Each structure stands twice: as structure tokens, then as C-alpha cells.
């Protein structure tokens, strides 16, 4: 499914409008194109990294601090998580950046119900995204709608839909977002995130 199919079904548009969304979908699903948007220093680190599905010598569950998901920068993490779904329910996940330190990033990830919250760690300096997934999750064949942000939102996931559209405009030059991000149970998610953060601080 493309942005066009997701937004408008199969309604035909003028050629110029079609190109805008087709270009956005192509960028959203091409690690090579994403890497071209990185600044000089980060681009060099990404291009010189190893193309791998898991880090050699990593330990622990995939996506944990000592076994982070290899991706091509924050753009790659954004695209990867926008394809991630629960294997049990089929539901999408939503996310924001919690911590970034040099080549590693921690995202807080939630379900729309707010019942499921978890940390997901990434190793950022690789030329492509991993094809592996955390236990209990699957990757969609292609990314269609963005479902989170690569910045930190103190009130996450409040008003996430608008924040996603803002990031999508910056990265893909169109304003789109997964509409389910409007209907997250914010209160429940924030309550469970507080517990997650408390547990993390105790480690």
C-alpha cells in the first residue's frame, strides 16, 4: 500500500500530486535514499558501518540495550518502527525518542491502548535497517504511514498525530501520519510509561 492508496483509496489524482506522494513513499522505504538526507558527518558514519541484522557479540533480547537494532540513523529507526506490529494482535506501535547518546538511541514504544509499553534500543550507524524483530513482533513489507517521532516529547503520547505530521513534513515533504495515533489512550499510556521509566532508573 502506498501513501496514495492509504489516503485516497484508488482515486486518481493529477500527475504532479501523485509524484509528491510517490516520492515520499519511495524515500520512506529506501535506506539508500534516506542516507542521502543525512548531514556530512553522520552520513559518513552510516555509510562506513556494517550492514547487519544484529551486532556481532550482542547479548540479551533483540532490541535491548546490549543487543540494539541496527539501523541507518534516526531516519532508519523512524521507518523501522513505522513497520513494526504486534504478532499477537496485529496492532501497530507508536513511539518517541527517549535518549540519544552518540551512536545509540532509546525509544519508548507503546500500543494504541496504552497497555503495552517497552524500551527499544537502536545502533544508528549502519547503511540499512535490520530485518530482525524483537520477540512478539513482525515487520510489515513496507512502511506506509509514520507512527512516531525522532524527537523527545515530554508529554508523549499527547497530541502525537500533529507531531508526526510535523516530522513527516520535514523528512518526506508531505503531511501524513497514522490516524490511529489520534486515538491513543494517553492517560493509560503515560501511567504505564511512568512505571517503565521507574524500572529503568532502578537498573
Image (cartoon, rainbow, N blue to C red):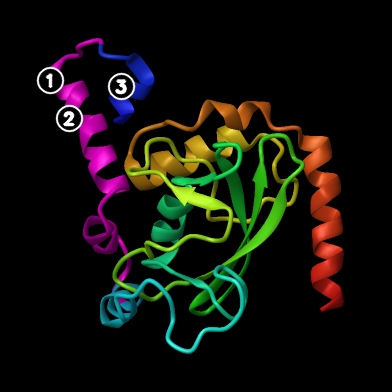
Q: Nearer the viewer, mark 3 or mark 2?
A: 3
* Dominant SS in magenta: helix
As drawn, the residue found furthest toward the bottom would be: 57
Return the mark for residue 5.
3
Give the position of the C terminus as an image quadrant. bottom right
Q: Nearer the viewer, residue 182 or 63?
A: 63
In the rendered structure, the answer to whether residue 48 lies left or right of residue 179 reads left
Task: Answer whether labels 2 and 1 touch (C-beta < 8 Å).
Answer: yes
Disc 2 and disc 1: Cα gap in Å?
6 Å
Residue 45 quadrant: bottom left
Which residue lies under the disc numbered 1? Answer: 15
**Label 3 or label 2, whichever comes before in sequence order:** 3
In the rendered structure, the answer to whether residue 194 lies left or right of residue 31 reads right
Q: Secondary structure at mark 2?
A: helix
Q: Secondary structure at mark 3?
A: helix
| Magenta stretch holds residue 31 | yes
The x and y percentages for residue 118 are 69, 57
Q: Residue at x 66, y 41 (%)?
A: 111
Span colored in magenta: 11-40
| Magenta stretch holds residue 147 | no
Return the mark for residue 19.
2
Amino acid at each position: 500500500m502506498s501513501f496514495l492508496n492509504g489516503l485516497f483509496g484508488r482515486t486518481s489524482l493529477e500527475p504532479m500530486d501523485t509524484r509528491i506522494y510517490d516520492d515520499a513513499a519511495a524515500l520512506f522505504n529506501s535506506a539508500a535514499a534516506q542516507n542521502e538526507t543525512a548531514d556530512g558527518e553522520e552520513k559518513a558514519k552510516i555509510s562506513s558501518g556494517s550492514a547487519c541484522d544484529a551486532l556481532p557479540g550482542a547479548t540479551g533480547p533483540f532490541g535491548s540495550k546490549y543487543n540494539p537494532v541496527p539501523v541507518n540513523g534516526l531516519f532508519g529507526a523512524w521507518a523501522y518502527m513505522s513497520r513494526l506490529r504486534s504478532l499477537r494482535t496485529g496492532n501497530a506501535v507508536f513511539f518517541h525518542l527517549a535518549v540519544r547518546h552518540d551512536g545509540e538511541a532509546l525509544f519508548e514504544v507503546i500500543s494504541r491502548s496504552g497497555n503495552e509499553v517497552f524500551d527499544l534500543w537502536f545502533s544508528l550507524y549502519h547503511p540499512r535497517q535490520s530485518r530482525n524483530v524483537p520477540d512478539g513482533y513482525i515487520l510489515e513489507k513496507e512502511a506506509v504511514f509514520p507512527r512516531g517521532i525522532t524527537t523527545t516529547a515530554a508529554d508523549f503520547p499527547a497530541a502525537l498525530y500533529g507531531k508526526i505530521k510535523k516530522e513527516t513534513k520535514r523528512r518526506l515533504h508531505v503531511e501524513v501520519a497514522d490516524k490511529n495515533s489520534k486515538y491513543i489512550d494517553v492517560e493509560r499510556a503515560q501511567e504505564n510509561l511512568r512505571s517503565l521509566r521507574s524500572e529503568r532508573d532502578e537498573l
